[in-house]
Image (tube, grey):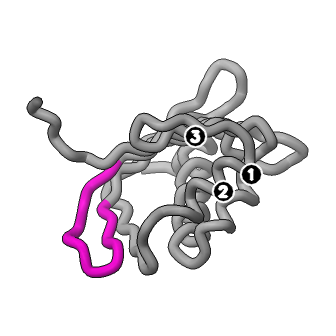
Amino acid sequence: MGDKPVWEQTGSSFIQHYYQLFDNDRTQPGTSYIDVTCLTWEGQQFQGKAANVEKLSSLPFQKIQDSITAQDHQPRPDSCIISMAVDQLKVDEDPVMGFHQMFPLKNINDAWVCTNYMFRLALHNFG
C-alpha cells in the first residue's frame, strides 16, 4: 500500500496537533482559527476566534485527555479538506465519553486553518 494522499496526511496532522494543543491548554487551539471561524458546540453557535476561545476556556473541567479512535478526511473541490474525528474523551474523574468533531480546513498563507468546526458528544437521544 502506497503513501496516503496529501489530504489525509494534512488532516491527520492537523487533528493530532489540535488535540495536543487542546489537552494542554484550551486557549491554544485558537492559533488554528481565523477571525471568522464558526463553532457549533452541542448545538450552541459561536463565531470568531475570540468567541471560540472563550467558549473552550469556559468549559467546566480541569483535566482532559483525548484518545482518537478514528478519523476520516476528504478533499473538497475548492482545494480545502474536511476532516472528521471520532474520539474518546476523559475529563476530570468522569467516565469516558465518545464524541465526534468535524473540521473543514483551508490553506491560508501556507498554513492550514480551521474555518468551521462542530462538536457533539456521542450520546443517544431517544426522547
The relative height of residue 102 versus residue 62 in the rendered view (above or below) is above
Q: Is residue 93 magenta?
A: yes
* Magenta extent: 88-99
Residue to which mark 3 is pinned: 39
Left or right: where 58 falls relative to 77? left
SS at mark 1?
helix
Mark 2 and mark 3 in contact? Answer it, CB < 8 Å: no
Q: Quadrant of the C terminus?
A: top left
Question: Could you tell me residue 110's position as x and y percent?
Answer: 86, 48
Closer-to-camera residue (121/16) = 121
Name which residue lies at 51% across and 73% down: 23
Residue to which mark 1 is pinned: 50
Q: How far apart, in angstroms, are the residues tagged by discs 2 and 3? A: 10 Å
Mark 1 and mark 2 in contact? Answer it, CB < 8 Å: yes
Residue to which mark 2 is pinned: 53
Closer-to-camera residue (110/41) = 41
Q: Label 3: how many residues lie within 10 Å, few (<14), some (14-19) or many (20+)?
A: many
Say what amino acid the circle numbered 3 marks: Leu
